[in-house]
Each structure stands twice: as C-alpha cells, then as structure tokens.
Amino acid sequence: MLGAKIIRFPVLPSTNAYLKEHFSALPHGTVVTCDRQTAGKGRFERAWHSDRDLLMSVLIKENLRLSEIPQLGLISAAAVFETLKKHVPDPLIKWPNDIIVGGKKVAGILLESIIGAKRLNCLVIGIGINVNTAAYPESLAKKATSLKLATGAERDIEELRLELIGNLDAFYREFKLGGRRHADICAENSCLIGKEVIFNDFKTSQKGKVLAILENGNIVIETAGVTAEYNYGEITFLDI
C-alpha cells in the first residue's frame, strides 16, 4: 500500500533525494514529505520554487519493467488531476509531468529511477503542488500559479496530501491489476492533444501537432505530414 509509512520533515534539501539515498532501508510505498525544500528540482534539473506547498515523494520498490516507467508518470498525473479537480476549476494535464490551471503550472511530477545490474531497483515519484503561495517572483509569475491564487481560498495541505496519496494508491493498484483508467484520464484532460506545439528533440526544434497520448505513456506528434512517437525523455516543449 502506498502511504502505509509516511516520514515527515520540516525541511529537506529534496524529498526525492532523501528516498534515493535511503531506499534500501525503506519499504515499498514509503512517502516522504516536508514543509520546505531547499534544493527541489523538476524535469531536466530545473529549480522548483516552494512556499507553503505540498511536497512529497513516493518509493516504488515492487518489480517493474523499465518500459513501465512512463506509465507511472501517467498514473501520477491522473492522481494529481483527480485530487485537484475538486479544489480548482478546469485543471488540465500537460504531458508528461505538469498540471495546468488557467494556462499556468500548479503542479509538477518528477520520476527518478535507481538502476543496478541492468534492472530497476526502485522508482521515486516526486510531486509538488502549489497550494497556499500568495505571490511568485516576477520571473515565475507568468508561468506559475497556486490553488490560493486560482480560487482565493487556502487549503489544508495535510488533508490534500492524504487525498493525493489515496488517489495515487488507487490508480497504482488498478494498474497492477491491468487497469488503464489513468491513461484515459490523461488523454481526455490533456491540454496538448489537437494543439500545434514547438518541441525540441535535443537535435533540432520542430513544429508539429499533438495527435494522442498513448497507453504506454508516449506522445504522438505529426510533423510535416510524418507521425512519430516520443517518450517522456526524448523531447521538451519550447512554447508552452
């Protein structure tokens, strides 16, 4: 069960880093939370600003294939979406790892794997939700929002955290039994499907149209009449 063991700290450099350092001594499903991170990061080592927010990481130690990692990203996004839709109007999922409200980022997900002897030892799922932040520095104000800024009301972070853990556990259990509801949620509530995007595949920048988010966690983009499938580590978006 995810969340059967919860470890709480007032301050940590990073909840993901803590689990990566201590994973061997901790059971599957351990959740680490803190009130403030001093060295939080997002995808591609981008800094994560945190202030009165929900910060947590979950340890996955059950047998997983490397090919299943992108699906854990969809599971995480679906769990965050299901949690937030009760608290904020019209949240959308930006593949592969963000939740958007009013065109601004309200939550982010970071998956980090520990691989040894050609097998996946464990996976760490880091989740940050901007909850009660009242203002952002100028450099972030056009890109980030919080539940408080979006609705005018503060939320109880601990209640929100427990709700999120419950949703994450439910989706993970369904996945282990062959369920794919998480993939449907991510596709049906995507802010990208049908949109023109500019993306970089770490070789060149290209313009294309997003056609689908697949059950395997990949995205399908049509560029100049050619359709291609990408995984979460192969591209980054430049215009959104």
Image: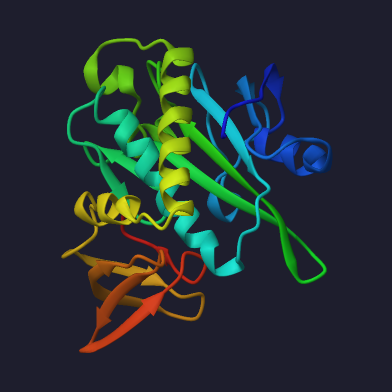
Q: Position of residue 39 (x, y in %)?
A: 67, 34
In the image, 134 versus 172, the foreground residue is 172
Q: Image point 66% across, 25% down: which residue?
A: 5
On the image, which quarter does residue 204 sit in?
bottom left
Find the residue positioned furthest to the front: 177
Q: Position of residue 173 (x, y in %)?
A: 46, 44
In the image, 129 versus 146, the foreground residue is 129
Q: How many labels does the image show?
A: 0
Q: In this view, does 164 lie to the left or right of 143?
A: right
On the image, which quarter does residue 105 sit in?
top left
Q: Position of residue 240 (x, y in %)?
A: 31, 54
In the image, 215 versus 19, the foreground residue is 215
Whether 162 is drawn above or below 57: the answer is above
Q: In this view, does 104 lie to the left or right of 57?
A: left
Quarter occupied by the N terminus = top right
In the image, 102 versus 78, the foreground residue is 78
Q: Is residue 120 left or right of residue 150?
A: right
Q: Is residue 105 visible?
A: no
Q: Where is residue 214 in the image (x, y as percent from the top left)?
A: 32, 67
**Colour mode?**
rainbow
Q: Is residue 66 visible?
A: yes
Q: Image point 54% across, 47% down: which residue?
A: 110
Q: Image point 53% across, 31% down: which residue?
A: 49
On the image, which quarter does residue 167 sit in?
top left
